[in-house]
């Protein structure tokens, strides 16, 4: 990891609660030359899929400006090739109750 600070910044808005879930509107600028992006920040929930990026925020100031550090790739960029025949067979056994010949 380099000692140079990321230029990926986000300005957070006022939290909004809908359907028992709180989201935070935000304006993100990934670099000085990039266009600003409008989005929302949601908390990660155990067992729920991630839409977009998982990020870490570090207070930068002033106001509600934070430095963004991505924790993992966006889910849409993850290769679907990670799902193998062995995975599918295991999924079928677990969730569809299909026994495999010779299963102990």
Image: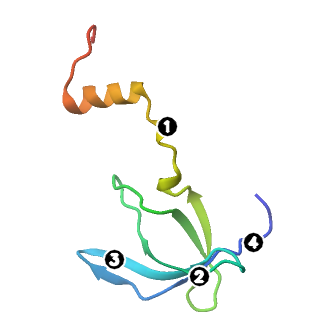
Which circle marks residue 81 in the picture? 1
Q: Earlier in the sequence, mark 4 or mark 1?
A: 4
Cα gap from disc 2 to disc 1, whole angstroms: 32 Å
Cα gap from disc 4 to disc 1, whole angstroms: 34 Å
Residue for badge 3: 22
Q: Give the position of the C terminus as an image quadrant.
A: top left
Residue for badge 2: 36
Cα gap from disc 2 to disc 3, whole angstroms: 23 Å
Tell me the mark number nearer the camera, choosing from 1 and 3: 1
Residue 16 spot, x, y in % from top left: 34, 84
Kindly indicate whether the residue at mark 1 contacts the one at mark 2 (C-beta within 8 angstroms). no
Cα gap from disc 4 to disc 3, whole angstroms: 29 Å
The vertical placement of 22 against 84, above or below, is: below
Tell me the mark number nearer the camera, choosing from 4 and 1: 1
Residue that appears at 44% across and 82% down: 25
Badge 4 local density, few (<14 within 10 Å), some, or many (20+)?
A: few
User: In the picture, residue 97 is in which quadrant?
Assistant: top left
Q: Nearer the viewer, residue 69 or 28?
A: 28
Kindly indicate whether the residue at mark 3 contacts the one at mark 2 (C-beta within 8 angstroms). no
Q: Nearer the viewer, residue 17 or 80?
A: 80
Badge 1 local density, few (<14 within 10 Å), some, or many (20+)?
A: few
Kindly indicate whether the residue at mark 3 contacts the one at mark 1 (C-beta within 8 angstroms). no
User: In the picture, residue 1 is in which quadrant?
Assistant: bottom right
Residue 74 spot, x, y in % from top left: 51, 58
Residue that appears at 51% across and 48% down: 78
Badge 3 local density, few (<14 within 10 Å), some, or many (20+)?
A: few
Kindly indicate whether the residue at mark 3 contacts the one at mark 4 (C-beta within 8 angstroms). no
Name the element at disc 3: strand
Q: Earlier in the sequence, mark 2 or mark 1?
A: 2
């Amino acid at each position: 990891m380099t000692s140079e600070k990321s230029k990926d910044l986000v300005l957070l808005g006022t939290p909004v609660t809908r359907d028992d879930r709180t989201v935070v509107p935000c304006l993100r600028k990934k670099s000085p030359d990039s266009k600003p992006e409008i989005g929302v920040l949601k908390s990660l929930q155990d067992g729920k899929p991630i839409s977009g990026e998982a990020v870490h925020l570090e207070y930068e100031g002033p106001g509600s400006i934070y430095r963004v550090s991505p924790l993992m790739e966006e889910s849409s960029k993850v290769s679907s090739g990670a799902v193998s025949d062995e995975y599918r067979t295991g999924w079928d056994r677990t969730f569809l109750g299909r026994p495999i010949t010779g299963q102990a």
